[in-house]
Image (cartoon, rainbow, N blue to C red):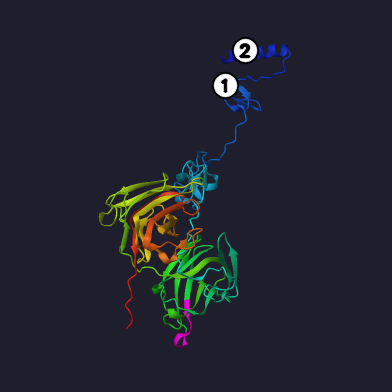
Amino acid sequence: MVNRVSSFGGVLLILLLASGCSLTLELSDCAVDGDCQEGYQCTDDGLCAIEEEEEEEEEEEECTEDNTCEPEEPECETNEECPSVEFVCSEEGACVHVDDVTCSGDEDCGAAFFCVDESCVPPPACDEVGGRVALMWSDFEDPEFTNVEGFREPVGGGVVATDVEEEDSVVLRIDFDVTAEDPLAGYRLFAFPATDVSEYNHVVIRARADRDRPLILRLRDDQVDGADGQSGAHVELTEQWREYTVALASFTEDYEEDRPVNLRALQDITLWVEHDPALPEQGRVEVDHVGLVTLPEDVEGVDFMWSDFDTPEVTNVEGFRNPIDDRTVEEELPGMGLDGSTVLSLAYRTTAVRQTTGYYFFAFPHADVSDQDVFVMRARAPGNVYNLRVRFTDHRHLGEGMEDLGIAYGMVSLGEEWEWVILPLNTLTLAEDMEEGPDFSVLQRISLIFGHAHTCQTSGEVEIDQVGFVSFPEEPEEE
């Protein structure tokens, strides 16, 4: 058989040459590549043919000493094995940066990113608007001065303070560059003269930092009994705007004088950046406002029940309750609240086109809550909801055929656990174009407003157990 093939090949080659063709063929017999001329290889048919170039493999395989090649071990099996939350583990077992991931769902982006238009993006920054301040100590609107007619100044040689104009307010920016030789870093807010804050029980500060870092709030009075009383408390700042309320009772007397502050003569509030005084460090803290407020020490229930959802579609003040529009969907959950009460679940959605939705709680014809001090709501949000607007509307008649409304609102945020959300009525903000707030003796409506511009997330769910008011106990008259 081999000789016949070889003879046939020779005859074919002579015919091709005689015809003037320049094609050269090599059809020699072979068993291995070494039987062929250079540039040729032995085919499966036992013939020498021109050698084909092998395509380079995309990835080199690791080979052992006996030339046995094995694939590389996978770099990861789960996202947690990658160097940070900015990397996810691919199907091939490699840690891939989220910027290089084409996603179809949030699960493709790991724990810290969301899938938007097939790309992994960071979650929206849910900053608290804040505003629960009854006495404003300083909002930095007046250059160099506090709201209690005192000056304000940086403390420490490595501190630079700047008033930065934001969209609707002024923010104090504290940049510090401290060393072991000059470790002080802070900012002092004076009152002149000393201010009586004894009617308040919480300090309020809205702030953020360049990274998670502690801040010390220090209170000092005006040399009562010949010595300054000082006390301090810690606040753990994050990179996002948060409003912190710190009970005055939690301030400790841990300074040299070791005696409590006289709140009837508070002289200054100082913001100290906490750091290791033996090490150099640079950083930044931003503060929107510092003030005081009175809050209930502990809420166990409501004094005036506006709605506990035990009657379908109706409030406890004989008014109806309903979603504002079809972008808020209500569902009643019997037995899910305190002592087996009914819980109201609200699923809301806002868009850039249809920006506002929410829920109404009416009184008919109105209700008198003028002896109440604080709005309270036992609620939670499974995914956290920041800056839910609570709006209060009265119903006043100035004359026959004439009507004038008083409207004010406050902001609250809801966490994943059940809690009493507290909104002091003396901290409300007047609605736009309103000259005065509502008359709470003829309160007609409480509205929960989800707004696209301020509520974060723009769509979500909240659960509400009770809505009502709490009054502070009357202090006994002094003899």
Residue 221 belongs to the span the image colors magenta: yes
Residue 65 belongs to the span the image colors magenta: no
Name of the residue lying farthest toward the front: 400
Residue ID for mark 1: 46
Name of the residue lying farthest toward the right: 20
Q: Amino acid at mark 2?
A: Phe
- Is residue 179 or residue 69 the one in the foreground? 179
Residue at 44% over, 65% down: 427
Is residue 20 in view?
yes
Specify start and end residues of the magenta stretch as a single range: 219-227
Residue at 62% over, 20% down: 28
Q: Which mark is residue 8?
A: 2
Assign the N terminus to one quadrant of the image: top right
Q: Amino acid at mark 1?
A: Gly
Q: Earlier in the sequence, mark 2 or mark 1?
A: 2
Instruction: Kindly state the secondary structure of the residue where label 1 is placed.
Output: loop
**How far is mark 2 from mark 1, CA to CA?**
15 Å
Residue 471 position (above or below residue 378):
below
Q: Residue 16: give x, y in percent of width and height.
A: 69, 13
Q: Are marks 2 and 1 in contact (CB under 8 Å)?
A: no
Residue 265 position (above or below residue 52):
below
Quarter of the rendering containing residue 142:
bottom right
Instruction: Specify few, some or many for label 2: CA neighbours under 10 Å numbering under 14, 14-19, or 20 or more.
Output: few
- Is residue 109 or residue 383 the one in the foreground? 383
